[in-house]
Image: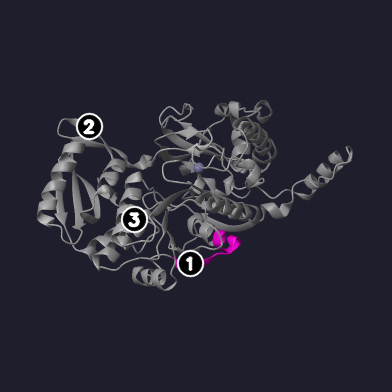
């Protein structure tokens, strides 16, 4: 990665030129040479990397699906096929010789950059976790991405922070961990609900007088609701930073309302969009200005999720990732399964003026676009929409749905816990009617105890909660 003060102010034409160069270098010198999967694939498909002159030619290359990376039953080491091999000694010597002719000091690739450091896994609870190999080179990039995200968020070493991301081998917790170390701020790495538990996290927020909490959206909203329920205030709290799970604007607005109720000093809410495939997360300066990406690290395309056609600026589509400057696991045109509702823009950010490409709108999970069987044929159900609708409500504390099939027809069972003071019987009827009207599928709704829901959705157990269970 390059100097952030340069990259973040580069005109879009210069960013494109930089990406052309990085991409061609990555493709020819890494993927075609020491990437077992792509090296073979290019041969099999008769693709000549020398003919790819820049990112405008990228659509000639095949996509990678996340399932391509999963361990096989017969071959648990299959994900290794996406990891760059360590360059041999002969390669370094021959490179040295070649450059020596021009009097340049290029020692060729440094084997240490390729040396395995650690594995971080994707967070998916519905999908199988995918292992991504990081080398020390990638670890440095993760730290740099973290520092950039903090710069975009406007965090400094004077901030005191509670890192409430779940402790696990994933890039989310560790990016925040390394950023707090690198920036030198005061931080409590709680490990999240799974490690420290909600009560202790809330106590720490109070005793450390921490103005900043970083957590999954569902978790901080629940924490704020808990404070409100017990009549506690959070007068030191100034900002909440959402990450890991998708945080639509409904979550931002709800958290702002709750911060008001618990007398927070300020009501700043910001978001980071973590993409396991990108081996890092991207921050947003202010809500709705889009996630500011790192063009010297990752190339982003937005494509039609069905046809794979590359879409224009600000067109809704699936986010596709190509690595421009990584080691360890390396990906070419990897489909993430994430949909950017506002697409991608290369226009400078109207708020902070940084010029890096931004991902706009809400992020939706493609896995939540389901086809259900209604009374009169198939119905397209967008679980992301239901999630937004439920997050927006102030009368619902926690919830989940189960989709069931009976006699070849699907049904949604909503299970919820209302906030204190809500009439749960009335709420039950209301929710049933509203969801049924919106999604045209039969719905049943029932309330249950707090413990039952917390356990079912895994609020204190998993990296992030699961609210849609497709049991068909
Ligand atoms: Zn901005």
Q: Is residue 98 magenta?
A: no
Q: Is residue 184 magenta?
A: yes
Spatial CA distance of label 2 from label 3 is: 31 Å
Spatial CA distance of label 3 from label 1 is: 18 Å
Task: Residue 443: give x, y in percent of width and height.
Answer: 15, 44
| Residue at the (60%, 43%) spot, across then down | 297
- Where disc 3 sits, the SS reads helix
Q: Earlier in the sequence, mark 3 or mark 1?
A: 1
Question: Where is residue 386, by image quadrant?
Answer: top left
- Does any portion of residue 245 appear in the rendered image? yes
Task: Residue 458: give x, y in percent of width and height.
Answer: 32, 60
Pick the quarter of the image with the C terminus. Answer: top left
| Residue at the (67%, 41%) spot, across then down | 30
**Residue 189 numbered mark, or none:** 1
Question: Where is residue 337, by image quadrant?
Answer: top left
Relative to residue 234, is residue 318 depicted above or below? above
**Residue 218 numbered mark, or none:** 3
The front one of 455 and 293 is 293
- Do residues under tags 2 and 1 come within 8 Å of each other at their CB atoms? no
Relative to residue 298, is residue 448 depicted above or below? below
**Residue 324 numbered mark, or none:** none
Spatial CA distance of label 2 from label 1 is: 47 Å
**Residue 378 numbered mark, or none:** 2
């Amino acid at each position: 990665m390059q100097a952030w003060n340069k990259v973040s102010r580069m005109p879009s034409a210069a960013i494109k030129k930089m990406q052309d160069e990085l991409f061609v270098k990555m493709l020819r010198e890494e993927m075609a040479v020491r990437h077992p999967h792509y090296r073979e694939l290019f041969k099999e498909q008769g693709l000549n990397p020398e003919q790819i002159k820049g990112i405008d030619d990228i659509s000639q290359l095949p996509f990678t699906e996340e399932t391509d990376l999963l361990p096989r039953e017969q071959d648990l080491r299959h994900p290794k096929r996406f990891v760059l091999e360590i360059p041999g000694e002969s390669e370094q010597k021959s490179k040295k010789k070649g450059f020596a002719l021009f009097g340049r000091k290029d020692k060729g690739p440094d084997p240490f950059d390729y040396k395995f450091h650690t594995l971080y896994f994707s967070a998916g609870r519905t999908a199988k976790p995918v292992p991504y190999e990081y080398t020390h080179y990638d670890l440095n990039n993760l730290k740099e991405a973290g520092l950039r995200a903090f710069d975009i968020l406007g965090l400094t070493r004077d901030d005191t922070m509670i890192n409430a991301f779940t402790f696990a081998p994933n890039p989310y917790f560790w990016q925040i961990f390394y950023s707090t170390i690198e920036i030198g701020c005061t931080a409590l790495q709680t490990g999240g609900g799974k490690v420290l538990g909600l009560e202790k996290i809330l106590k720490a927020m109070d005793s450390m007088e921490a103005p900043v909490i970083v957590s999954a959206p569902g978790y901080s909203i629940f924490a704020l609701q808990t404070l409100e329920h017990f009549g506690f205030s959070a007068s030191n709290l100034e900002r909440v930073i959402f990450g890991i799970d998708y945080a639509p604007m409904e979550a931002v607005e709800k958290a702002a309302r709750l911060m008001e109720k618990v007398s927070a000093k300020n009501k700043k809410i910001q978001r980071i969009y973590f993409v396991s495939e990108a081996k890092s997360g991207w921050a947003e300066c202010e809500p709705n200005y889009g996630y500011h990406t790192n063009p010297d690290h990752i190339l982003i395309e937005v494509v039609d999720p069905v046809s794979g056609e590359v879409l224009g600026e600000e067109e809704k589509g699936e986010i596709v990732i190509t690595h421009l400057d990584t080691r360890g696991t390396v990906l070419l045109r990897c489909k993430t399964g994430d949909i950017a509702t506002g697409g991608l823009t290369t226009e400078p950010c109207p708020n902070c003026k940084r010029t890096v490409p931004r991902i706009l709108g809400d992020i939706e999970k493609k896995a939540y676009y389901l086809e259900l069987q209604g009374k009169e044929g198939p119905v397209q159900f967008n679980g992301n929409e239901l999630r937004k609708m439920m997050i927006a409500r102030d009368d619902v504390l926690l919830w989940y749905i189960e989709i069931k099939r009976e006699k070849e027809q699907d049904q949604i069972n909503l299970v919820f816990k209302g906030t204190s003071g809500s009439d749960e019987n009335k709420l039950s009827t209301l929710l049933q009617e509203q969801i049924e009207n919106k999604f045209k599928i039969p719905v049943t709704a029932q309330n249950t105890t707090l413990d039952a829901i917390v356990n079912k959705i895994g609020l204190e157990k998993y990296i992030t909660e699961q609210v849609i269970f497709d049991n068909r």
